[in-house]
Image (cartoon, coloured by chain):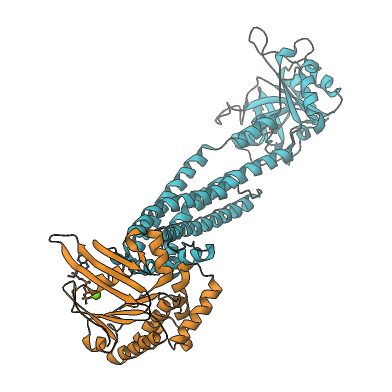
């Protein structure tokens, strides 16, 4: 029985002891924490921006409506393009819960600015016949001029998708503007805004169904039908579409939900995110080396403090805990500052883009965790060295 | 008289090296509770080595050192630390005060590793500061204190845990003679109040003031003058 009782430091006392180095050498502590802050900040910002961007895209998709379904002609048994029946849009319109139906039909005609010099590269453009109710169905509006209506859809006039207009070098609708289409002049009446859910419309030059029949030899078979259904009944409608569009060959009909594809793409992590995360990790590692460096110097400089603490009754383990906690505290401050910086950067950028601000838990918790992990590794060796110092060695001056 | 607080039996300390340095070559002596002892000797005679052994900061390479009846060879590092925290107080020539802390906080740190809660540490530190006559400097940082005042703070820190023994290594070594005399008077005062104190010094005049002088030369005790 020695009558000696080993007592632990209270947490508040450990915190005070661990912060001595930081309180007395503030600039140095701040600079070494900065390295950690930059690393963590970069990681949080990358994750925050990609999550906010995704939230923005999903909100945009939501705004456009997830109740749009498309019906396309698929492949026939011998591998040709199959044909949708002429009455497919009308049949689909009879399904309960279907609220809107519109159709387009791809035509083989080509389009140029002028018959003499087909100078503009227009190979990516698709001439399509389009029904007059197309716009609300695909969720876009007119940017300039007007869309086709019951009167103009019989006439040789065109409406340009957003991309098609810029390909043709047309940015304004003015009286007399025309394009050379299928061997004759068609007058321009309107330009559309981008249709996010139906990007094929953006690349299209649209003419009325009747005009296509009259001037371009169109046979009346649609190639794509756009269907809006009650949101609650989308799945049910989707299952009925193929059979309704072509009761004889339902297997030659492709049905899809454009918003689902967009959502899947929005949710897929960008390749760049991984790259920037890697850069953030490298910065964090460099910050950790900085912390380790500072801790080694700190232990060398504070030998007499270590000796004094041993004389006052500190155990080796308490000296070790002091310096390890100091390194942890340093990286925790750096990590917290980094999370704040990263969150701030995300918040500022997301709000300029009109996205919701999303900081994923993986970002801030992972950032703090990584900072603490790095701090523990960086502090371990200096702490062990401090604890190994014999009291007399530590107290010896000069 | 009471049991020895400190006992050395043929304690030796050889520092390894080429050639090894025999800093202490078998020292036997004891300090009883309530004594005030001067360990005096020329530079390099082994006084600090002796003080480190007495304070359990170092272990003897041969012989035995006991503090309050405990053989330090049988104690682990945590036990030695607890022994220093509760039963030994140190005063150093270089004061070893924390520059960023007030006098009061420096004194309170004397209780840090003894498991005393912060409010009580401060209360007892205030008492100890009062005892060394520095109540009016409690909030001062060491850099704002004179050398003599700094050493008083260090003495208060050594005393605050009411240790069984206080070990002072050249406590007046960094002070002018007036301040040195004042520190000596303070130590004598504390001794009169019952404290057990060992003062290591190379200054014979200073040692002459103390009731018992142990003279060290080349790692050996050459004289142990007890008061008559
Ligand atoms: N860590 C060490 N390693 C090697 N030799 C040492 C060590 N510490 C002390 N010595 C040697 O041991 C001898 C005694 O040293 P010590 O410090 O005990 O003397 P001292 O009496 O305190 O001297 P001073 O009055 O100068 O402080 C000296 O010769 C010194 O060089
Ligand atoms: Mg000495």
Q: Work out whether A137 lies above or below A11.
A: above
Is any part of residue A398 visible from this angle? no
Of all chains in the rendering, the one displayed in cyan is: A
The structure residue drawn at horizontal position 35% and vertical position 62%, both measured from the top left corner, is A299
Rendering quadrant holding ligand 1? bottom left
* Quarter of the image where the C terminus of chain A is located: bottom left
Q: Work out whether A147 lies above or below A26.
A: above
Q: Quick one: A18 or B4, which is closer to the camera?
A: B4
Measuring from the top left, give residue A355's x and y in whole percent.
65, 48
Is A209 on the left or on the right of A182, as rendered? right
Is B181 on the left or on the right of A280, as rendered? left
Q: Colour of chain B?
A: orange
Q: Quick one: A170 or B162, which is closer to the camera?
A: B162
Measuring from the top left, give residue A257's x and y in whole percent.
71, 28
Measuring from the top left, give residue B127's x and y in whole percent.
50, 83
* Quarter of the image where the N terminus of chain A is located: bottom left
The structure residue drawn at horizontal position 51% and vertical position 37%, both measured from the top left corner, is A271
Q: Work out whether A165 lies above or below B42.
A: above
Measuring from the top left, give residue A205's x and y in whole percent.
67, 29
Is B119 on the left or on the right of A304, as rendered? right
Q: Quick one: A231 or B134, which is closer to the camera?
A: B134
């Amino acid at each position: 029985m020695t009558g000696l009782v080993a007592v632990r430091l209270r947490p508040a006392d450990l915190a005070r002891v661990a912060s001595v180095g930081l309180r007395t050498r503030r600039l140095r502590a701040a600079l070494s924490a900065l390295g950690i802050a930059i690393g963590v900040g970069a990681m949080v910002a990358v994750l925050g921006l990609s999550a906010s961007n995704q939230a923005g895209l999903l909100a945009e998709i939501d705004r456009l409506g997830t109740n749009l379904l498309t019906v396309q002609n698929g492949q026939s048994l011998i591998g040709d393009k199959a044909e949708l029946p002429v009455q497919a849009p009308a049949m689909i319109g009879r399904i309960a819960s279907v609220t809107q139906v519109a159709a387009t039909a791809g035509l083989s005609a080509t389009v140029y600015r002028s018959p003499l010099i087909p100078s503009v590269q227009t190979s990516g453009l698709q001439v399509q016949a389009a029904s007059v109710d197309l716009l609300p169905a695909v969720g876009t509006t007119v940017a300039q001029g007007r869309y086709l209506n019951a009167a103009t859809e019989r006439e040789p006039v065109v409406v340009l998708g957003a991309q098609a207009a810029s390909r043709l070098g047309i940015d304004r609708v003015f009286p007399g503007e025309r394009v050379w289409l299928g061997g004759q002049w068609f007058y321009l009446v309107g330009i559309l805004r981008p249709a996010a859910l139906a990007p094929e419309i953006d690349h299209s030059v649209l003419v009325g169904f009747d005009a296509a029949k009259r001037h371009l030899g169109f046979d009346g078979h649609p190639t794509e039908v756009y269907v809006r259904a009650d949101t609650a009944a989308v799945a049910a409608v989707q299952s009925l579409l193929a059979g309704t569009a072509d009761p004889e060959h339902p297997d030659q009909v492709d049905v899809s939900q454009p918003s689902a594809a967009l959502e899947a793409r929005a949710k897929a992590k960008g390749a760049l995110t991984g790259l920037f995360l890697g850069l953030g990790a490298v910065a964090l590692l460099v910050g950790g080396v900085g912390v380790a460096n500072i801790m080694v110097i700190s232990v060398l400089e504070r030998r007499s403090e270590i000796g004094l603490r041993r004389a006052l009754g500190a155990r080796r383990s308490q000296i070790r805990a002091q310096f390890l906690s100091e390194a942890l505290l340093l990286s925790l401050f750096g990590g917290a500052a980094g999370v704040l910086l990263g969150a701030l950067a995300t918040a500022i950028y997301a709000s300029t883009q009109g996205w919701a601000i999303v900081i994923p838990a993986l970002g801030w918790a992972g950032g703090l965790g990584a900072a603490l992990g790095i701090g523990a590794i960086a502090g371990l060796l200096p702490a062990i060295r401090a604890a190994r110092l014999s009291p007399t060695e530590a107290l010896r001056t000069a | 008289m009471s049991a020895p607080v400190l006992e050395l039996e043929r304690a030796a300390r050889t520092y390894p090296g080429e050639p090894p340095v025999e800093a202490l070559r078998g020292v036997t002596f004891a300090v009883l509770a309530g004594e005030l002892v001067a360990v005096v000797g020329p530079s390099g005679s082994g006084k600090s080595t002796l003080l480190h052994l007495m304070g359990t900061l170092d272990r003897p390479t041969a012989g035995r050192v006991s503090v309050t009846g405990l053989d330090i060879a049988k104690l682990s590092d945590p036990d030695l630390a607890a022994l220093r925290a509760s039963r030994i107080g140190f005063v150093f020539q270089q004061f070893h005060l924390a520059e960023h802390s007030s006098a009061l906080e420096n004194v309170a740190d004397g209780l840090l590793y003894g498991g005393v809660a912060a409010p009580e540490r401060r209360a007892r530190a205030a008492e100890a500061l009062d005892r060394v006559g520095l109540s009016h400097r409690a909030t001062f940082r060491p850099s704002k204190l004179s050398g003599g005042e700094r050493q008083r703070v260090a003495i208060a820190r050594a005393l605050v845990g009411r240790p069984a023994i206080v070990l002072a290594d050249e406590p007046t070594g960094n002070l002018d003679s007036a301040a040195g005399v004042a520190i000596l008077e303070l130590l004598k005062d504390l001794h009169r109040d019952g404290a057990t104190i060992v003062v290591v010094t190379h200054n014979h005049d200073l040692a002459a003031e103390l009731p018992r002088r142990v003279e060290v030369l080349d790692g050996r005790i050459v004289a142990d003058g007890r008061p008559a």
